[in-house]
């Protein structure tokens, strides 16, 4: 069956001497794998269009239950040149794509598609606060996936303003204020400032996430919370190679 779809290229690998196997996230069918025959040849009609992170329009031969579909045609809808030209941006984009790749299956899920597309646009166009785009993406994606943390108020007394010191339960996805005390499940201490940042990242339009002024210590705490939250609620996201690569790259850049 001939099918059409809009897709974001999550990653690709070489196949034989001239072909590629692409992992795509489509708006219409969720995650699919596609064989692009002859796509690496110097005269390929796909030249430049099948790069990782590209937003493309596809025509492909689709068969229900087949693990690998076959590409017929592709054209670029939107490319993100700075994601390929800057190592830091490339590493950040890879984190988002790996999250989608590991957790999404073949199904029509428009919300994750649009969230990822908006995040890639913001990352491509942004110059500052780029880690905040990834933080907002992770919180909003995990909420779409059905594991939304409830941070609007204290779990016990429903007071909306967090205290200077609070208790956050990763397992329950809730927090309690200092007056109400420790949550039953394993909790960690967290400042009211970090609670408010988490609330903001969960609701902010992705293209505005980079505007937040986040001190290094608060950013590191948020990153640790998000990593623990993903690991606790989605087994497939317990270890992300792209995050390891990002940390390694930051260390190398810090030494230069």
Image (cartoon, helix red, strand yellow):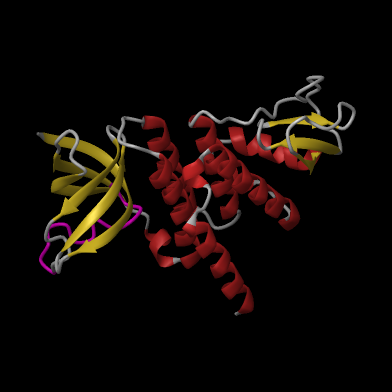
Taking depth in this image into account, of 129 and 216 the one nearest to the observer is 216
Taking depth in this image into account, of 55 and 232 the one nearest to the observer is 232
**Residue 84 at x, y percent in the picture:** 39, 63
Residue drawn at 41 percent across, 31 percent down: 111
- The span shown in magenta is 42-55
Q: Find the residue positioned furthest to the top.
A: 157
Q: Is residue 86 left or right of residue 56?
A: right
**Count of picture labels:** 0
**Magenta stretch: helix, strand or loop mostly:** loop
**Residue 186 at x, y percent in the picture:** 74, 38
Which of the image's four quarters has the N terminus?
top left
Residue drawn at 42 percent across, 41 percent down: 103
Q: Is residue 6 above or below residue 176?
A: below
The reply to whether the magenta stretch includes residue 46 is: yes
The quarter holding residue 66 reads top left
Q: In this view, does 85 lie above or below 217?
A: below
Whether residue 136 is visible to the viewer of this picture, yes or no, is: no
Q: In this view, does 194 lie above or below 253?
A: above
**Residue 214 at x, y percent in the picture:** 70, 51
Q: Is residue 181 above or below residue 222?
A: above
Q: Find the residue positioned furthest to the right.
A: 179
**Residue 175 at x, y percent in the picture:** 75, 31
The quarter holding residue 156 reads top right
Q: Find the residue positioned furthest to the bottom.
A: 256
The reply to whether the magenta stretch includes residue 240 is: no
Residue drawn at 39 percent across, 39 percent down: 104
Whether residue 203 is visible to the viewer of this picture, yes or no, is: yes
Residue drawn at 69 percent across, 52 percent down: 219
Q: In this view, does 145 lie to the left or right of 187?
A: left
The quarter holding residue 7 reads top left
Which of the image's four quarters has the C terminus?
bottom right
């Amino acid at each position: 069956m001939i099918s059409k779809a809009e897709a974001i290229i999550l990653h690709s690998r070489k196949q034989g001497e001239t072909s590629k196997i692409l992992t795509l996230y489509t708006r219409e069918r969720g995650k699919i794998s596609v064989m692009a025959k002859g796509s690496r040849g110097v005269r390929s009609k796909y030249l430049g269009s099948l790069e990782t992170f590209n937003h493309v329009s596809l025509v492909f031969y689709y068969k229900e239950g087949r693990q690998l579909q076959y590409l017929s045609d592709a054209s670029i809808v939107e490319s993100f040149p700075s994601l390929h030209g800057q190592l830091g941006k490339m590493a950040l984009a890879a984190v988002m794509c790996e999250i989608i790749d590991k957790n999404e299956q073949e199904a029509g899920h428009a919300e994750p598609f649009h969230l990822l597309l908006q995040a890639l646009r913001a990352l491509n166009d942004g110059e500052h606060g780029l880690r905040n785009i990834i933080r907002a993406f992770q919180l909003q994606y995990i909420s779409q996936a059905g594991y939304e943390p409830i941070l609007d108020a204290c779990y016990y007394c429903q007071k909306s303003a967090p205290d200077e010191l609070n208790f956050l339960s990763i397992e329950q996805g809730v927090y309690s204020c200092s007056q109400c005390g420790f949550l039953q499940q394993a909790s960690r201490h967290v400042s009211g400032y970090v609670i408010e940042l988490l609330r903001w990242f969960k609701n902010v339009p992705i293209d505005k996430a980079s505007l937040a002024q986040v001190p290094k210590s608060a950013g590191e705490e948020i990153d640790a919370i998000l990593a623990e939250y993903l690991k606790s609620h989605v087994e497939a996201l317990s270890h992300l190679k792209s995050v390891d690569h990002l940390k390694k790259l930051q260390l190398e850049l810090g030494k230069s």
